[in-house]
Image: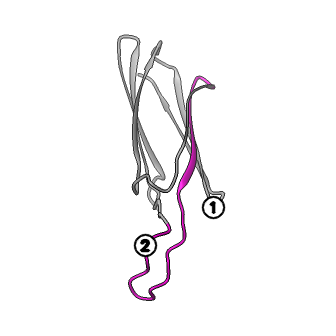
Amino acid sequence: MADPMRIRVIRKGNVADVKMLIFHPMETGYRTHPATGEIVPKHFIQTLRATHNGVTVLEVEWSRSISRNPFLHFRLHGAIAGDKIGIAWQDNFGKSGNGEATIK
C-alpha cells in the first residue's frame, strides 16, 4: 500500500506553507456499487489535527462532502528550521493515520 499521507513544508522567513495530501476514499454513502447496485457505505475522515512542536495549531471536523484524497494547505507563522509539524486524522470507521514533517 502507498503512503497514507504526504506532507510538504516550505519555509520562507518565519512563515511555513504546510501542504498535505491524504489518501482516503471519502465515500459519501450516496454512491451505488456498479456491479451489485448496493449502496457503498459512508467512509470519511471526521477529524484532523495539525500540531507545531506538539502544540495544536489546526483542528478540523470534516463530513462526507470532502472529496476523495483530500488536499489541505495552511500557513504557519513563527516557524524555524528544525521544528516538527505533525498531522493526525481519524475516520468514521475508527481508522486513523498520522505523519510528521521537519521544517527545513
Q: Residue furthest bottom?
A: 36
- Dot 1 falls on a residue whose secondary structure is loop
Q: Pick the residue in front: 93 or 98.
A: 93
- Dot 2 falls on a residue whose secondary structure is loop
Query: Mark 2 packing: few (<14 Cα in 10 Å), some, or many (20+)?
Result: few
Residue at position x 45%, y 88% in the image: 36
Left or right: 13, with 89 as reference point: left
Numbered badge on residue 31: 2
- Specify the segment rendered in magenta: 29-54
Q: In this view, does 18 lie above or below 22?
A: above
Residue at the disc numbered 1 = 93
Residue at position x 50%, y 68% in the image: 29
Left or right: 88, with 80 as reference point: right
Residue at position x 41%, y 49% in the image: 70
Q: In which quarter of the image is the C terminus?
A: top left
Q: Position of residue 9 (x, y in %)?
A: 40, 29
Q: Pick the residue in front: 102 or 52.
A: 52
Q: In this view, does 30 lie above or below 71?
A: below
Q: Is the magenta stretch mostly helix, strand or loop?
A: loop
Q: What residue type is labelled 2?
A: Arg
Q: In this view, does 26 lie above or below 56?
A: below
Q: Does the magenta segment cover residue 42?
A: yes
**Which quadrant of the figure has residue 89?**
top right
Left or right: 34, with 64 as reference point: left
Marks 1, 2: nearer the viewer: 2
Q: Position of residue 103 (x, y in %)?
A: 45, 23
Which mark is first along the chain, 2 or 1?
A: 2
Q: Does the magenta segment cover residue 28?
A: no
Numbered badge on residue 45: none
